Amino acid sequence: MVDAPTVLAPAAGASAPDAVAKPLVLGTAAPARRPAGVVGRRSAVNALFVAPYFVVFLLLMVAPLGLGLWLSFQDYDMLGGYAGPVGWDNYTNLFSDKIFLQSVLNTFYFVLLTTPAFVGLGLFLALALNDPFRRSAVLRSIFFGSSVLSVTIVTLVWRLVYMPERGLLANVTRVLGIEPVNFMTTEALAMPGIAIVTVWWIIGLPMMLFLAALQQIPREVYEAAALDNASRWRTLTRITLPSIRRTVVLVAVIEVILQFQVFGQVHLITNGGPNGATRPIVMFIYEAGFRDWSLGYAAAASQVLFVLMLLAAFLQIWIGRSRQED
């Protein structure tokens, strides 16, 4: 085989005597470089695809956040109108307001009741239903089915369950010889009762997330563990849980953010009672803004809720990362 002939060409920009000869292979072409205008036009076209989402994001997320932050420093009444800036007065009034402080404690209490239940019960259901049998598919559909119901339907059903005299729970307790308990009017039981409703309603989402994570674990890993005579508990703690650790953190963060925004089921079941024992922050914001018409005060409470949600989410992520490093 004969090599392609070469010729020596002077380097670009050099004078004839000082030119450095560079071999050029005849029959081959240098790689073509795209003109700068073509690259710019492609970038502009790509930006057009992103523009609709970016505009919607600015209008529905960034602009309301900025407006809410501005309102939190203003004295703005929906009936009296704009009365000018008040600085940090809305925030100082919030942290001296006993009703607001109680709503913050109620919200944290509700998050602590529901988030571990979502993670633990969701993982348990996913482990129990992670098989190819038809009965498991039917049960998965049943557990996930409640998640598609509206909050109005869910609360209507559970109000019938919690009805003091003729409700389902009262009838069951009478059969068992136990005095019926009224969840909706007992301060110590009202929030746990709403937590039960919430877990029953939304348990399908964390279950499906855990199922998706479990089905990504290679079957060969479990086969190798079976060959080593590993027990079910050792397989769970050494293979399954480490493999889905990120999903556990994801579910925890999602549920913390969602449960900090609890409102619908509280409003429809107890309306914040009894004696404010179930009033969350979102209900306080609703009452301040749309009952008392004080938008500046409600906006300040919204900013506090936003900061609490961020701190809780970052705490969950930090805990998850520290466990991964260990």
Image (cartoon, rainbow, N blue to C red):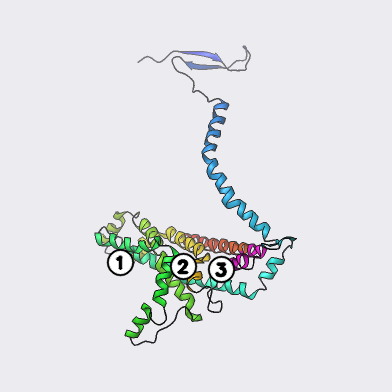
| Residue ID for mark 3 | 283
Task: Locate the N terminus by quadrant.
Answer: top left
Amino acid type, residue under disc 1 in the picture: Arg
Residue hosting label 1: 232
Q: Position of residue 8 (x, y in %)?
A: 52, 13
Label 2: few (<14), some (14–19) or many (≥20) C-alpha neighbours in 10 Å: many
Residue to which mark 2 is pinned: 115
Give the x, y percent position of residue 112: 49, 71
Label 2: state its secondary structure: helix
Query: Badge 1: few (under 14), some or many (20 or more) residues near its Cα, within 10 Å?
Result: few
Comparing 294 with 307, the one in front is 294
Relative horizontal placement of residue 277, taking residue 166 as reference (left or right): right
Q: Earlier in the sequence, mark 2 or mark 3?
A: 2
Residue 57 image point, x, y percent: 56, 48
Q: Quadrant of residue 208?
A: bottom left
Foreground of the two, 82 or 213: 82
Query: Which amino acid is tagged 3?
Result: Met
**Residue 224 relative to residue 86: left or right:** left
Q: Earlier in the sequence, mark 3 or mark 1?
A: 1
Magenta-highlighted residues: 284-301
Label 3 sits on a secondary structure element that is helix
Residue at 63% of width from left, 76% of height from top?
Answer: 98
One can see residue 117 in this view: no
**Location of residue 315 by image quarter:** bottom right
